[in-house]
Amino acid sequence: MLLDPRTGKPLAASGEKVPLTGVDAKDLARPDTGNIAPRVVTSGTGAPRLLLFARVSVPVADRKQDENQDQAGDLRGDQDAEERGLLFVVSEKVAAPAVYGAGRTGQLVDRNGKVCASAPTTGAALTAATGHRALPAAAANAANTSVHTGDVSGSVLGDGRNGLRRVTGWASVVSEDGKDDASGLGLTVLTAREVPPAKTGADHMWFALVAAGALVVIAVLVTLVLWGTMQRPLLRLHLSAARLARGVGEVPEERAELARPVPVLGFGEPGRAGRALESIRRQLLGETGPEPEQEVRRRPGVRALVLVCALVIAAWGVPLLFLLNRVPAAKAVPAAAVADQQARTEAAADRVQRSLGGSRTDLAAAASALSGASRERAAEVLRRERADHPTFRSLYVLDRTGALVLQVGKQPVRTLVPPTGEGITQVNTSGKIPAIAAYARIPAPGKAKGAKKAEDTAPAVVVAEIGVDALDDLVSRPGLGSVWLTDERHRVLAASVGFEAFQSLPSRRLTRLVAKTDAVPGGAGKSASAVLHAGTSPGEGLSVAAAAPLAQKGPAAGLGWRVVSAEPAAALKLAAYQVQARTMLAGLLALTAGSACLGWLHIVVVRPLRTLTGCAERLAAGDRRTVLFPVHHDECGSVTRSLELLRQALVERDRGAGADLAAVPAPSFQCGSAP
């Protein structure tokens, strides 16, 4: 309908009556109001209608008088103006949302929860649609509330009925930033399905208690073993060394401490250090001389003890990390999740097909505008078309011989042989950039659309190359995992993840799944889905995969393209996988904490103790030249200080007895680092 904005009267109309209740044509026609947002109104029959508006300007200087006197009177006052602004209004039925998958319903509701359109339902879906009448309003309320917080989708869980439970998913008809023309409509798309309640999984509380109890027992045993074999002997060694250091002092009462033997406790380094102290004590009393240094046979020491403790902790953590609570492949993913992956893949394929079909339709309209246009006018049409379609990387016109006569945008990847009619095609089958093109014949001037042999007389064809980035954005769907668009030879044309042009799919299992969708002679193919093992890409395990033909009919059906998706099963947040993830987390935490504690013990206790033992054995063997400096301020450092006092006492004793070897100062050695 074409309206005069000043009077609101229709100047021309076609088709059904346009409901204009509440429409202020004069206000909408003002150019300072920006784009006119669409709106949903109710027609005389009560059915909702979507109104689309556009401002148009028509020349009036040479306009002939219409036979209708009312219209002539309205136009008479504008004969002196060059153009006249009018309001163009289109009324169309509110489209029902597309529904994919068996047993699902689809509805489009307004902000009050009133159903504007419903997808056709049959069988089980029809039965499901008859109940739960409160869910559309609840979902619409959730959508209107959440859209202000940035959430444009969600779900609502209904009550159980006849052993089934209604689940309704909703998505607001708005863009992510909420600034598009559809934001003010307040429409929400609902999809619903009745599903059986999830079966109660096994009770893992008993397993958790047993695992926690075993970990506590292991921690207590490791602590007691380390205390009894390492920490307690080290403390006794510290006390014995301090007692001997007091015995070599000048206080007569304390010299009696040398008469008490040094107890040798523990094995490994603490036992060796105790035996060395006992030898030094006897040398101070003059009972024996320095012991000859002998090659010590390799025996288990404190390092071996720490290693055994690490193996005990690993015996608890490794099974949790790799073996226990594994999900059986046959029972891992429910059939409903596999069916949902296939339905969402079909929706992604339909989205790509609709976008390509819209590009083809818009290009056909541009081809009509190019008919009979001058070169300057044709270039302007192409520039405007590319500005309106950012997905077009290049627009060009070919003549009958295939020569490029006009081009806008980037250089074409490869020009086409002039095709007939209009459609979508794949430009190249190799190279670094996959190129897809929409094409349309430019009608010959003076030929009516659809005239006989119009294509034979058409002077040229207009082609629009669609960029790969646009296809990447089309196939990307939240929660669908990795998505690929493949050609008829199952090579990748676009993907939501990184890819190389015309590469194969990441796994052979995925390729075999796509092969199941291939059409039989005379058919268009069908969707397929499965649970795949061993990863559809490196690093992945079990995945839910699906493949769907790009189109079952229409121009895109002959391309043989497929949309393929693969979602890691662990990302589905299934109860079994949550238990598996928590079990793996417990094992990982145990291994991490055990490694950290034992590593700290090795650095702080084991290494200083081994160095201390070496210093004590060399002193007992007669090394009087090495000055011992304590490095640590703990028991090992205290024993080192006591050993230095004992060394000085031995040197003084050798001098007083007239020994042949004089105590000559020597280079310093820090007892705490390797000699």
Image (cartoon, grey):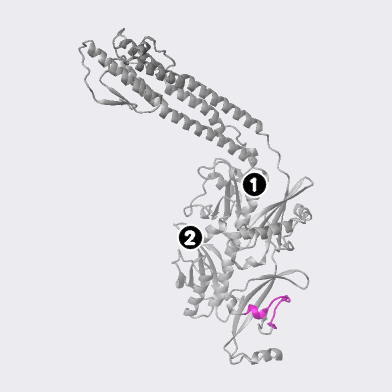
Residue 25: say if magenta.
Answer: yes
Q: Quadrant of the C terminus?
A: top left
Q: Is residue 311 left or right of residue 145?
A: left
Q: Please report the residue visible at 45 percent of the width from the left and 22 percent of the height from the top.
A: 231
560 over 398 or under it: above or below: above
Element on which disc 2 rests? loop
**x, y percent for residue 250:** 31, 15
Q: Amino acid at mark 2?
A: Asn
Give coordinates of residue 376: x percent, y percent. 47, 79
Label 1 residue SS = helix
- Which label belongs to residue 24? none
Picture layout, residue 456 above or below residue 352: below
The relative height of residue 240 versus residue 50 in the rendered view (above or below) is above
Label of residue 428 in the image = 2
Residue 338, numbered circle: 1
Residue interval drawn in magenta: 8-29
Alpha-carbon distance for marks 1 and 2?
Answer: 34 Å
Q: Dividing the image into 4 quarters, which one contains the N terminus?
A: bottom right
| Residue mark closest to the camera, 1 vs 2 | 1
Q: Residue at position x 69%, y 73% from top?
A: 91
Residue 525 visible (yes or no): no
Is 18 within the magenta?
yes
